[in-house]
Amino acid sequence: MALGRSPWIDDELAMLQEHVARFIEAEFTPHVPRWRKDRMMDRAAWLKAGEAGLLCASIPEIYGGGGGSYAHEAVIHQEMTRAGHGTGFGVGNSTSSAVVAHYILAYGTEDQKQRWLPKMAQGELIGAIAMTEPQGGSDLKALRTTARRVAGGYQINGQKTFISNGQNANLVTVVARTGDEPGARGLSLIVVETDQADGFRRGRNLDKLGMHTQDTSELFFDDVFAPSSNLIGELPGQAFSQLMHELAWERMLVSLDATVNMERAVELTVDYVRTRNIFGKTLMDFQNTQFVLADAKTQATVARTFVDGMMVRLLAGELDGPTAAMAKLWTTETQCRVIDACQQLFGGYGYMSEYPIAQLFADARVSRVYGGASEIMKVIIARAL
Ligand SMILES: Cc1cc2nc3c(=O)[nH]c(=O)nc-3n(C[C@H](O)[C@H](O)[C@H](O)COP(=O)(O)OP(=O)(O)OC[C@H]3O[C@@H](n4cnc5c(N)ncnc54)[C@H](O)[C@@H]3O)c2cc1C
């Protein structure tokens, strides 16, 4: 009944998949209970991941990366999600390697690429993207953080929130207003190298419902100076189009997560109901259980087929924004329904944090909000009708 290998995974990627799974088991799994308690991974784990070639896998070798494609990045992302470790490295690495590094690769100057990408690939620099502000995240055009032109660079003032890698990041790509133009036209991407930025302050590591190995924080900028050479792109005012360019890819990463989570939920639940005995038979013997799981398995299989098809398109450079939005909308909404139905079969145990199904339930919820809320996905899809 299994679908077999995804069409976008060849022999080399299958080997990478095994390498990542072995690495996670040896280097991450033993530390996960502590990371869950600390609500973040160790910085040292990033260096280990760098040594193992798991950072910037899709960045060219001349910039210290793995020389692979988005497929390599997607394999690493999926394996981390499959390991079910509170999405610390999955979200963290994809933010740094698959998103921030790609803004630099696509729009950065040669000097920026040489300065930052090799260190990101080693884990010495960890990237974050700081868009969201307390007064709103969906409405990017309303962002208030300013980057005022001063001699030799920009002076940044403002506050960001919900920033992934917020505690560990030391290369923060800030979306800031560099011009007086209203809406999106005045927004630019400016890198703040936080190890040397006076006026930069991290707020709390926010206590989240799930994703307990991932640091998510507020960030504060009080007269932070960034040199002109840290502006991403030739000219200011380009942030909106730069951000939009990578959005289909970011949404595919969330869709891959959702798909893997559905597959895992079904596996975990099948294992559980086969061994749980009630009313003199196994829970699997009840027709309701079989129907719930048949439905869940069908949805996971449809999701896998859909997402694999979208990955093929993405790798061919043919995935458009509205279709990527459909993938994110459908897989994330379906994921929450599937996990909820599976969790019900665990009874009270499904509500206990030590059970992976409970962790999945908590981890998955955010996927309908971050990377663009479901309602924003509908706006994008509706606009293209
Ligand atoms: C764990 C986590 C990690 C995150 N990581 C990052 C990060 O690394 N960098 C970053 O910049 N941000 C990050 N975010 C922020 C995330 O992108 C925002 O939370 C998201 O964009 C929604 O913005 P908001 O929370 O301000 O909600 P709002 O914009 O206030 O929206 C609230 C709700 O209003 C509804 N809504 C919004 N717009 C519309 C509309 N047009 N039509 C109808 N209904 C609408 C939706 O239901 C939405 O969920 C993260 C968030 C979380 C929770």
Image (cartoon, grey):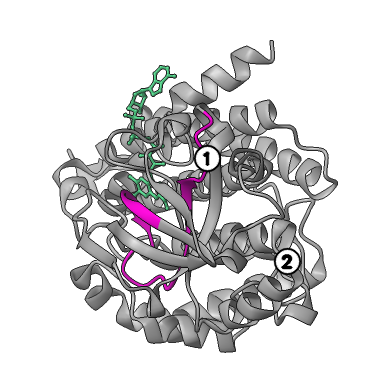
Estimate how packed mark 2 is, as few (under 14), some (14 to 19) or many (20 or more) residues with alpha carbons within 10 Å.
Answer: some
Task: Farthest residue to the top: give it.
Answer: 385
In the figure, residue 59 lies in which quadrant? bottom right
Tell me which segment is drawn in magenta.
Answer: 156-181
Task: Give left or right: position of 259 versus 282.
Answer: right
- How many angstroms separate mark 2 from mark 1 (CA)? 21 Å
What residue would you read off at disc 2? Answer: 109
Query: Residue 71: in sight, yes or no?
Result: yes
Q: In terms of sequence position, does the residue under pointer 2 or pointer 1 come before the other? A: 2
Query: Residue 264: in sight, yes or no?
Result: no
Which quadrant contains ligand 1?
top left
- From the image, state whether disc 2 or disc 1 is nearer to you: 1
The amino acid sitting under disc 1 is: Gly
What's the residue at 59%, 47% (across, down)? Answer: 250
Asked if residue 314 is positioned above or below residue 291 in the image, the reply reads below
What residue would you read off at disc 1? Answer: 179
Asked if residue 52 is positioned above or below residue 131 in the image, the reply reads below
Task: Farthest residue to the front: give it.
Answer: 151
Towards the viewer: 109 or 302: 109
Where disc 1 sits, the SS reads: loop
Estimate how packed mark 1 is, as few (under 14), some (14 to 19) or many (20 or more) residues with alpha carbons within 10 Å.
Answer: some
Task: Farthest residue to the right: give it.
Answer: 316
Task: Give left or right: position of 123 versus 290.
Answer: right
Residue 140: x, y in percent? Answer: 46, 34
Quarter the C terminus occupies: top right
Residue 194: x, y in percent? Answer: 39, 73
Q: Main SS of the magenta segment?
A: strand
Where disc 2 sits, the SS reads: loop
Asked if residue 28 is positioned above or below residue 282 in the image, the reply reads below
What's the residue at 51%, 28% (across, down)? Answer: 183
What's the residue at 28%, 58% (across, down)? Answer: 220
Towards the viewer: 314 or 109: 109
